[in-house]
Each structure stands twice: as C-alpha cells, then as structure tokens.
Image: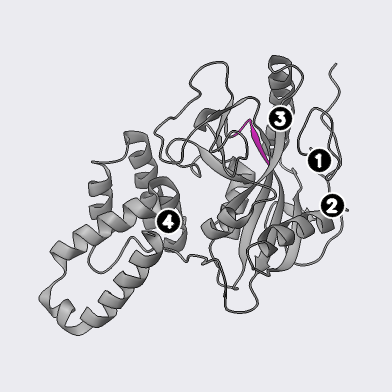
Amino acid sequence: MDPPIHHPLGKRPAAEDDSVISDCESGVSGGDTAAGFVPADENADLVRTRFVRGLAAHGLKPEVLAVGRNACSSVMAQARQHSFHVFARAVAKLRDGNANVKFAWYGASSKEEISDIVQNGFFGHAHGNGLRLFPQDSPLESVKSSVVDKDGLRHLLLCRVILGKTELVPRDSNQCRSSSEEFDSGVDDLSNPKEYVIWCNQINTHVLPEYVLSFRFPSPLKGHVKIGEPLRPSSPWMAFPALISVLSKILPPPDIAYIAKFHKDYREKRISRHELIQKVRVIAGDKLLFSVIKSFRAKKIPASFKANKGNEWQAESQQLERYWLK
C-alpha cells in the first residue's frame, strides 16, 4: 500500500517545488473561523507570515485576524481528502514521481461560500473554463477577487493543488481541458507562473482546501495597488433576467445554466444577493459584465433617472471604467 502524502508546511521535498502539508486535524490559533474549519495548528504562523510578506511587496499591510484549518469532519469531506491523495499518487506515477503539488490561494466572496466549498467542493465556483488559483507567494490577485463582508473582513482559502505537468494557458483563452494527455493543468507563464488553472472535471479531485485566512486592511489603502470592490451587475436599469438574456448570447450554455441556477437560488432565498453577484462575477468576468451593463444602460436609462441621478451615475461610471477597464 502506498504511503500517504504527508509533509509539514514549509519543508520542500525534492520532488516538489512547494510543500504538502499533513492531513486535516485540529490545532491552535486565534479568532473566529469559517464553518467547517477549526483553529489552525502549528503551521498557522507560517501561513500568516507568507501571506503578509506576499502583500508587503506591494505596499499593503493586512491585519490577519484568524487562520483556520479544514477539519474534514464530514464523511464527504473525508472522501474528497482521500480522493486528493489517490489522484496525487496517480499523477506522480504518470509524471516520473512528481505530482507537482503546490499551495495556492482562492479569494472567497464570503464565509458562506467557504462553507459551501468545504461541504460540496468547488463545483459552481469555477470560471467557465476552469478554477483559477494563485501561488502561495503571490496572494494579491486572490485578495482582489475576495469581497469585504458585513464585518469588514475578507477571506481566502489556501489550498493544496495537484498541478502535474503544466501547459501554457493565457488568461483570455477559451481552452477548457488539457490539450493532450501529456498535460494535467494550465499556468499563465511556464517559467514564473502567477496563476494556476485546474480544469472543471478535476476541481474536486485536484484541489483540497487546507486553511482559511480572515483579514482586513486597518486603514484606507494607499500606494501601488487598488483593491476592487464588487461590481454590481444588477441595477435599477438592468434586471438579472435581462443580464442573463444578454450573457446567453456570449457565454457557453454550461455557464448560463450555472448563472440561472444561482439566480433561482437567490429568488428562493438560499443565497444572498451579494453571493449571487459574486458567483456571476466569477463565471462571466468583470470586464464582460461591465461592458454588457454599460451598453445596456446607455440605451435604457429613462429621462427621469438622468435628470435626478445623472451626475451620480456619470461619476460612478467613470470610476468603474477607470478600474474595471484599466
């Protein structure tokens, strides 16, 4: 029987460029953690330090309030954990003993999204052509995709990811699976990747959430980086059904099916409007949403709205355009 893949965080086995940490268990750390997570173990300080150091390079100083570890307490969570180990061994056998397991960040929209991922996996949380995550030493993009919750906090998942042999997949690519059996996953740059792409048919076998990190920025952000806030694709001048109708002419049917499902969940009060917006952002992308909404409202804004809210709308449009279309 094959031995378990089991390495403490921070050590670098010869067969891996990054580390693989041990199986899910409880430990000690501070702060409140998301449902499905327990206070982190002795690796909490290392997770925190690497995160803070990764943002310090961009002039950002986050305040980390809690680091939690995936408890893997449910039967299905344990099954997904076991499946991850099985696939890691299988990929290692295919790739000369190296499964190329990395740590990577995922920016969450809320604690509720994290709990859903822990309970049900990443299905429904991936972009149309795959799940995009960011290297452990480059957390900035995941921070940008995270959302401030009602308590003023943002939440990231630190996951173990089986990359295997990677191929180049540009961000604007429509590729939705490996180009051949020679490859297992995608990256944006073969020599210095800043983004990993795990295909949709592998996101519940090749990605394992390990830690949740909750943080905030204690003062207004200044300096080199602008952290975006949610784009709101539903507005007084574009209802969600209209948005779905327009997107159905652009996005593939599976993406539209996901959006329609999330809209149904929202109408049935299973998810909040905030969560609905974030899920649509992940699937469609902010640039496409902004373009669709801008085009739609240019044609549909009533004269009374222009008279009463014209200046406010113009300022908002200019601000969004500067950020989302930069």
Q: Is residue 163 left or right of residue 250?
A: right
Q: Residues within 10 Å of mark 4 (few under 14, many from 20)?
A: many
Q: Quadrant of the N terminus?
A: top right
> Which residues are drawn in magenta?
204-208
Mark 3: amino acid: Asn
Residues at marks 1 and 2 touching, judged by CB atoms closer than 8 Å: yes
Q: How far is the residue under mark 1 from the one under mark 4?
A: 33 Å
Chain-order first, disc 1 or disc 2: 1
Q: How far is the residue under mark 4 from the one under mark 2?
A: 33 Å
- Please tell me which residue is depicted at 68% across the width and 33% down the height of the picture: 80
Element assignment for label 4: helix
- Please tell me which residue is depicted at 13% across the width and 72% down the height of the picture: 302
| Residue 83 % position (x, y) | 69, 28
- Give the labeled residue for mark 2: 43
Q: Residues within 10 Å of mark 2 (few under 14, many from 20)?
A: some
Report whether residue 193 is seen.
yes
| Residue 235 % position (x, y) | 29, 66
Is 205 included in the stretch rendered in magenta?
yes
Choose top left, top right, bottom left or bottom right for residue 143.
bottom right
Q: How far is the residue under mark 3 from the one under mark 4?
A: 34 Å
Q: Is residue 130 left or right of residue 140?
A: left
In front: label 1 or label 3 = 3
- Give the labeled residue for mark 3: 100
Is 89 included in the stretch rendered in magenta?
no
Rendered image: mark on residue 21: 1
Residues at marks 1 and 3 touching, judged by CB atoms closer than 8 Å: no
Q: How far is the residue under mark 1 from the one under mark 3?
A: 13 Å
| Residue 228 % position (x, y) | 48, 65
Residues at marks 3 and 4 touching, judged by CB atoms closer than 8 Å: no
- Give the labeled residue for mark 4: 276
Q: Residues within 10 Å of mark 3 (few under 14, many from 20)?
A: many
Q: Is residue 235 left or right of residue 224?
A: left
